[in-house]
Image (tube, grey):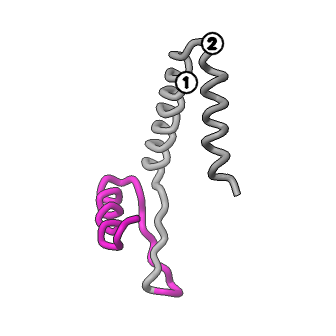
Amino acid sequence: MLAIGAMTNRLTRLESKGLIERVNSKQDRRSVSVALTQQGVVLIDEAIEEHARLQQAIVESLSESARPELNGLLKTWLAQYEY
């Protein structure tokens, strides 16, 4: 969890890089909405694609016999977070 000041600093850095924009609420001056800019969307899309490529490479590095074992272990691990 982040303190308000830490979040503000991170948002300021992202805004200065042109990745997000802040919009002050007209109804509540304490409220600010944050949205990705087009540049931010492009960067996120690239990051997601690279993340998927890395995950695929990790799985492909496993032997065919190890993949089902990993799948079973991950299912067991993830089941701990289901409600």
Residue wearing tag 1? 56
Residue segment shown in magenta: 1-28
> Which quadrant would residue 18 be assigned to in this image?
bottom left
Q: Secondary structure at mark 2?
A: loop
Residue at the far right in the pictured view: 83
Give the crowd class for mark 1: few <14, some 14-19, many >=20 residues within 10 Å. few
Magenta stretch encompasses residue 2: yes
39 versus 75 height, above or below? below
65 versus 74 height, above or below? above
Q: Secondary structure at mark 1?
A: helix
| Mark 2 or 1, closer to the camera | 2
Mark 2 residue type: Glu
Where is residue 5? Give x, y as percent.
30, 72
Where is residue 35? Give x, y as percent.
49, 61
17 versus 58 height, above or below? below
At x 63% / y 52%, what residue is drawn? Answer: 81
Q: Nearer the viewer, residue 6 or 68?
A: 68
Q: Are marks 2 and 1 in contact (CB under 8 Å)?
A: no
Q: Which quarter of the rendered picture does the N terminus lie within?
A: bottom left
Mark 1 residue type: Gln
Q: Nearer the viewer, residue 74 or 59?
A: 74
At x 60% / y 27%, what residue is drawn? Answer: 70
Where is residue 32? Give x, y as percent.
45, 75
Residue wearing tag 2? 64
At x 63% / y 49%, what residue is drawn? Answer: 80
75 versus 64 height, above or below? below
Number of residue marks: 2
Give the crowd class for mark 2: few <14, some 14-19, many >=20 residues within 10 Å. few
Where is residue 46? Give x, y as percent.
47, 36
